[in-house]
Image (spheres, rainbow, N blue to C red):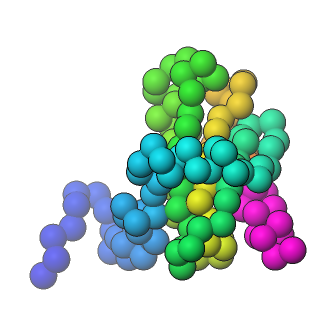
């Protein structure tokens, strides 16, 4: 019998366990990988994020985050933004093409709510799909 965390129903556990994983293979880890994206990137920009991306030779997309202290002063807010981006990427990774993606935060992003940031990221993911289909 599986042990359930206190206060979590079976239905919620099924939803949480069905989420796509975000393992090491889905992340940009090395400085050289980030450098490669920065040097040859195509980009998508809006008022919240700048998304840089290049094709990779893998069968899946990879994500890197570069949320600068200069843009977002508070560590708490930077970490919240990173969690939102990772969560959104994890949900949509199955429909994204094989790309290396770096997400950068823009000024005044801290004032925006979670829903607005999710909508912004969804718009970027659809742009990436359209640009790669060309």
Does 66 sit above or below residue 63? above
Where is residue 110? Give x, y as percent: 64, 27
Q: Is residue 121 visible?
A: no
Which residue is at 74% across, 37% downward? 48
Nearest the eye: 2 or 62: 62
Where is residue 108? Give x, y as percent: 72, 24
Q: Is residue 122 magenta?
A: yes
Q: Which residues are magenta?
A: 121-134
Where is residue 3? Give x, y as percent: 15, 70
Which quadrant is the C terminus positioned in?
bottom right
Which residue is at 64% across, 39% downward? 104
Determine whether, in the image, residue 30 is placed left or right of residue 81.
left
Q: Quadrant of residue 61?
A: bottom right
Which residue is at 56% across, 73% downward? 57
Does 72 sit above or below residue 1? above
Q: Is residue 103 magenta?
A: no
Nearest the eye: 18 or 12: 18
Which residue is at 70% across, 51% downward? 40
Determine whether, in the image, residue 3 is placed left or right of residue 7.
left
Determine whether, in the image, residue 120 is placed left or right of residue 69.
right
Q: Is residue 40 visible?
A: yes
Which quadrant is the N terminus positioned in?
bottom left
């Amino acid at each position: 019998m599986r042990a359930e965390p206190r206060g979590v129903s079976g239905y919620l556990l099924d939803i949480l366990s069905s989420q796509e994983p975000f393992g090491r293979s889905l992340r940009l880890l090395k400085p050289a990988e980030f450098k490669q994206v920065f040097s040859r990137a195509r980009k998508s920009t809006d008022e919240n994020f700048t998304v840089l991306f290049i094709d990779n030779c893998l069968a899946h997309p990879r994500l890197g985050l570069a949320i600068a202290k200069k843009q977002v002063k508070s560590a708490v807010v930077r970490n919240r933004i990173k969690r939102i981006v990772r969560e959104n990427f994890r949900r949509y990774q199955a429909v994204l093409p094989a790309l290396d993606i770096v997400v950068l935060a823009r000024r005044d992003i801290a004032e925006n709510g979670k829903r607005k940031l999710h909508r912004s990221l969804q718009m970027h993911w659809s742009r990436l799909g359209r640009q790669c289909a060309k």
